[in-house]
Image (cartoon, rainbow, N blue to C red):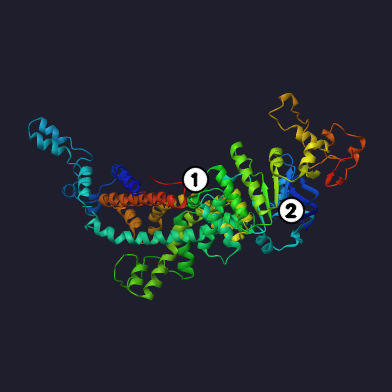
Amino acid sequence: MSEPVVEIRHLNVDYPTRIGVVRAVDDVSLTIERGEVLGLVGESGCGKSTLGMALLRLLRPPGRIAGGQVFFNGRNLLELGEEEKRLLRGERISMVFQDPMTCLNPLQRVSDHLVETIRTHRPEVSKKEARAQAAELIDRLGIMTERLDDYPHQLSGGMRQRVMIGLALALNADLIIADEPTTSLDVIVEAQFLELLRELQQQFNLTILLITHNIGVVAELADRVAVMYAAKLVELGDVYPLFDAPLHPYTRGLLRSVPNIRLTDDDLEIMSGVPPDLYNPPPGCRFHPRCAQVMDRCRLEEPPFREVQPGRSVACWLY
Amino acid sequence: MTKYIIRRLISLLPTLLGVTLLVFMFIHLIPGDPAVVMLGEHASAENVKRIRQQLGLDKPLLLNFEAPAQALRGEIGIGEGVKGLFDSQYLGFLGRLLRGDLGRSVHEKTPIADLLKLKFPATIELSLLSMAFAIAVGIPAGIVSATRRNSIFDGLSMVGSLIGVSMPIFWLGLMLIYFFGVKLGWFPTYGRLPVDLSLERVTGLYTVDSILAGDVRALGLALKHLVMPSVALGTIPMAIIARMTRSAMLEVLQEDYIRTAYAKGLSERTVIIRHALKNAFLPVITIIGLQIGGLLAGAIMTETVFSWPGVGKWVYDAILARDYPVVQVAVLVITLLIALVNLLVDISYAFLNPKIRFE
């Protein structure tokens, strides 16, 4: 196997607040291989978006990386200076954000957004050339080139999200971090968008970190899935084996709580309890207060995250 | 767009009409008689009466009901009676105004139009420079305060702007005169140019005129005379603009598209200027427009303190002299100016915000 694009080792991210420090990402280790789509799932507040922002080195203050290493194409991201980080963003790592309405500058035309991205990293490209590239790009994304000079408010939600993808694709980034890319789209547009994303991924062999709480989106696109719970990675594996036979009780609960049109509502299980308070996480396994298969050991000792089958890792004392 | 501007200009007319009526009524509420002011307190009743007649002050204020009454009694014809109804001070003023006749100053005995040509550029020059000062200091201060939130600079500039907002103009003016004019002698304390300096009058803006004349010395002197009045007049708008810029920037910097801009790999400078400031400018431009209205009010005090021969001092003197025609015209001009500035601000929205298009 070739060198992974991203290798995260024991990453910790802290948010110091007035009443204490919240560790939003706790000892997470993860690799993303070139050309794969890694789905990162978990409920709101589990740290999945924070992980994405940490990769871009764009954590909002006071958030900070408190430990660990992140290798990107073999270079440790945490040792880069400001200017090096800046040059990485948008060119080598690009980001697709959740809400395309608020994520595009309302005063910039579609062309301005794209040309700006291209010319920031390729100053030698002339304005005219960058504009031509932008036109080609949006054409490939299924937006008529006449819309190049439209402002974001003149575009539909799906189009805006495609412009966001355009920004991510503009410079052939090695890694695209897509943070809830479809959450603000309706189901029809979401399906079209996922279709487009899959086509692009196959066509350009894109490496995507897909952050979402939507299991359906992961099933649609991802090759592998990482499940996060309360700042920790709990399970990691190839998408179908993991969905067919989830190992961690949390993953099982998560999958069972997805509504299915073929099943009655009675089959829909809702996990009891709420995620723990990260100011004061429970000892042992963080899931133990909600776990049906809890053992004494779970209350005291934290389960290590280890490989239990080839390509399948889990943090649970059951295995 | 042109249609919109024309519509706005037409809607200006009723506003201006209302202003003339209001000013006319208010000024007659002030006790005092221009004839008495002119002739002195010991003038004979006969002389006062003669002057009042001369000035048309013996006519009724709004409508002359005496004429139709006479017509009803059969003393004069019906046509004359109807015509006479409109023979009042206010309607006479309005009629002359429509014919382009601004009237004569009671006090200075010269046509108001000539005086206006003389005073107006002085106020425009002072206002422009004050606003330039307010914007040039206020906006950068606001930006730095917002991007270095809670820093020492932020604290100082916000306390400073609070003081600036609360400072009475006349007091600030007097302090400037005392320290920089009298004590340090850096700047002249009154007027627009030394009396012995003559400058060919083209625009009436002395800075522009001196450049046109190629007179560097005059330009320097004109600017020197402008410094303290501009600072006195510009301080309040400057403080308000700084605070507004800061809060608008803080809000915009939280927006998702700022995060996108950083994620594109733009430098902080580019993000702040090209993405944040442009978006923050919309509320700031509104405030700037409103401040220009306040500026003209402040000009009355500033010009009086610095003996600046502009519209503000002119109005002040005219009020003291009960020079009714001058007050009316000057207030009308100021109103017109404020209305035009507001129109300009509204039009500028269309250029700043693509979501606004006037149809």
Q: Is residue B178 left or right of residue A3?
A: left
Q: Nearer the viewer, residue B208 or A142?
A: A142
Q: State how far apart marks 1 and 2 are (Cα).
A: 37 Å
Quadrant position of the C terminus of chain A in the picture: top right
| Position of residue B269 measured from the top left corner of the image (x, y, whole percent) | 59, 61
Q: Nearer the viewer, mark 1 or mark 2?
A: 1
Disc 1 packing (10 Å; few <14; some 14–19; many ≥20): some
User: Residue at left 38%, top 75%?
Assistant: B216
Q: Nearer the viewer, residue B247 or B318?
A: B247
Residue under the image location 46 percent in, 68 percent down: B182
Locate residue A121: give its quadrant.
bottom right
Give x and y (percent) for residue A280: 81, 41
Numbered badge on residue A64 = 2
Q: Within the image, what quadrant is residue B187 found in? A: bottom left
Q: Subunit of mark 2?
A: A
Under circle 2, the secondary element is strand
Figure check: A166 above or below A272 = below
